[in-house]
Amino acid sequence: MVINVREKYLKTTGKLRFMERIYLPAIFKGMWITLKHFLFSRAVTVQYPEERKPVAERFRGRHVLKRDEEGKERCTACYCCAYICPANCIKIVAAEVTPEIQYNHPEDKYAQIFEIDLLRCIFCGFCQEVCPKAAIFLESEYELAADSRDKFILTKEKMLDKTGGPRKIRQ
Amino acid sequence: MLEFIIITIVKLLVIFMVVMTIAAYSTLAERKVSAYMQNRIGPNRVGPFGLLQPLADVIKMVFKEEIIPDHVNPFFYVAGPAIMVFIALLPWTAIPFGENLELFGYIIPIQISDLNLGILFMIAIASLGVFGIMLGGWASNNKFSLLGAVRASAQMISYELTMGLSLAAVFLLAGSVDLRNIIGSQQSSVWQWNIIVQPVGFIIFFVSMLAETNRNPFDLAEAESELVVGYHTEYGGFKMSLYILSEYINMVTASALITVLYFGGWSIPFVDFHALGFNQNLIAIISVAVFTAKTLFFIFVFLWVRWTLPRFRYDQLMNLGWKALLPLSIANLMITALVALLV
């Protein structure tokens, strides 16, 4: 490291030289820096609504309920997520799978009601870590604004994975 | 006589519109320049590249509710911005923009009135600008406003001295206070420009102009971080926009004055249009364009300085004015006078 003799002198004596006292060289130096930025630098702004940056792979956004390879709902209403949830925002009502809806549910039990209160949710991701069926994930959706409290309750319909869909079986 | 009145009214209208437009667009320029200096984009939503932003701002300001707070003195509260914008526009009556036009057999000077004491008039008007600030600040009955107004007026009065003294050196060289003669004295070659002849005087004048127009680094009158916005803290809507507009007009005026006094007005280095045998009207148009370009450049310099330098402390400002610039400008004047006497 180079020892700056000038700075050491300044610190000990507190005296400025003539060129420092007339300010002008320092001012021109500063103006050259801003001019360089003005002429050569590119803006780093992201024009948000039109232009979006991709979110990170591990980003924890809005919850999505996944379907399995056959398009059936993975969730079996085991209550693990509701139990682990530190914000206590998951509400599940379990019900028995009847033959009529068997095409959509692989096991005996399913979540009749599965609601998440986004106003309480802290997006900690514990639910996706604890889920034994790999059914719930926090994905990339992050524009969650709404204009009333009811709209912050995520129902099962809103959360269910759009792709896949329930497999239609012939009766 | 009638033609004279008509011509003068037309010139008044044109210059008023042009000055207002340049002042309004310098608000946009300020935001754009600061944005580019900070690697941002700046306003770009209203119109292409945000070019209609000043219009949107004006519409918003004009349609705001007129609020006169209970604790103010209503008469002076309203009079403040009106006086301010009036005085800001007044110097434009005497600034010459270019060579004479010849239309329909009339010789029309591109200047509202050819005052033979031009620059003295300008100094007189500039010092009146304190009234608008002081009245507004005092009538607002608010400690921030009052402090801002006191600071602004103290600063403007102190820096007027150095400004006047640095100008005196220019008068000495030109042998006249008429702005046209001052430009004429610089026109023969670029070595006659006062920036070359009077570099120290130019620096003093430029610094005092920054202080006179309350621009950064001497914007202690508004000093957001200490005084909210200083003397117009209590103002809103149209009245506030008048204050801000007049500050920008002052900046445009200062740039035009710098062009006239130190950068040879409308003359271009190493080019003499009269020798090239151009038509008088063509020369007039070119000279106005050159004058405008130089003025716009100095507006940019004002913005550039603002977005580079931090604000002075109040005692530093006064020290700089009274202990550094005033003796320096007196010395500059003495040396200029001595040289003018000997040569």
Image (spheres, helix red, strand yellow):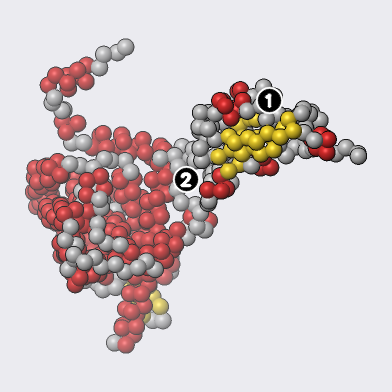
Between disc 1 and disc 2, the foreground one is 1
Say what amino acid the circle numbered 1 marks: Ala
Q: Is residue A158 above or below residue B54?
A: above
Which residue in the structure is indicated by mark 1? A134
Q: Is residue A66 above or below residue B335?
A: above
- Front residue (pair A81, B299): A81
Identify the residue shown where x is 38% and y is 81%. Answer: B105
Identify the residue shown where x is 48% and y is 55%. Answer: B50
Which residue in the structure is indicated by mark 2? B41
Say what amino acid the circle numbered 2 marks: Ile
Does residue B313 show up? yes
Residue most extreme to the right: A171
Q: CA distance from mark 1 to mark 2?
A: 44 Å
Residue A100 placement: quadrant:
top right
Asked whether, in this view, residue B228 is left or right of residue A75, the answer is left
The 10 Å Cα crowd at callout 1, few under 14, some 14 to 19, many 20 or more, is some
